[in-house]
Image (cartoon, grey):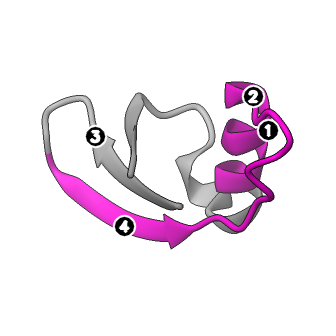
């Protein structure tokens, strides 16, 4: 799965690749924690995540 990270204003920041097993349910909290672990500079910023 690919996660595109953008600012609320629509500026593209990055794309992250998230590996998961489709048998198990993935929560938005898990995805948010993954993004923050990979990009700690995004802490306390308004971002939008698009999941492909």
Mark 2, other Cα within 10 Å: few <14 / some 14–19 / many ≥20:
few
Which x, y percent locates residue 14? Answer: 36, 67
Q: Are marks 1 and 4 in contact (CB under 8 Å)?
A: no
Which x, y percent locates residue 51? Answer: 43, 45
Which residue is tagged 4?
A: 14
Pair 2/3: label in front: 2
Q: Are marks 2 and 1 in contact (CB under 8 Å)?
A: yes
Which residue is tagged 3?
A: 7
Who's the residue at 67% across and 38% down the image?
A: 32
Disc count in the image? 4
Q: As drawn, is 10 to the left or to the right of 42?
A: left
Real-space Cα distance between discs 4 and 3?
A: 10 Å
Which residue is tagged 2?
A: 27
Which x, y percent locates residue 46? Answer: 41, 28
Q: Secondary structure at mark 3?
A: strand
The stretch of residues the image draws in magenta is 11-36
Pair 1/4: label in front: 1
Pair 3/1: label in front: 1
Who's the residue at 53% across and 61% down the image?
A: 1
Q: As drawn, is 39 to the left or to the right of 16?
A: right
Q: Of callouts 4 and 3, which one flags the residue occurring earlier in the amino acid sequence?
A: 3
Real-space Cα distance between discs 2 and 1?
A: 5 Å
Real-space Cα distance between discs 2 and 3?
A: 21 Å
Quadrant in the picture for residue 4: bottom left
């Amino acid at each position: 799965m690919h996660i595109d990270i953008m600012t609320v204003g629509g500026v593209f920041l990055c794309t992250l690749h998230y590996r998961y097993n489709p048998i198990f349910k993935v929560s938005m909290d898990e995805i948010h924690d993954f993004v923050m672990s990979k990009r700690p500079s995004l802490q306390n910023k308004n971002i939008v995540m698009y999941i492909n």
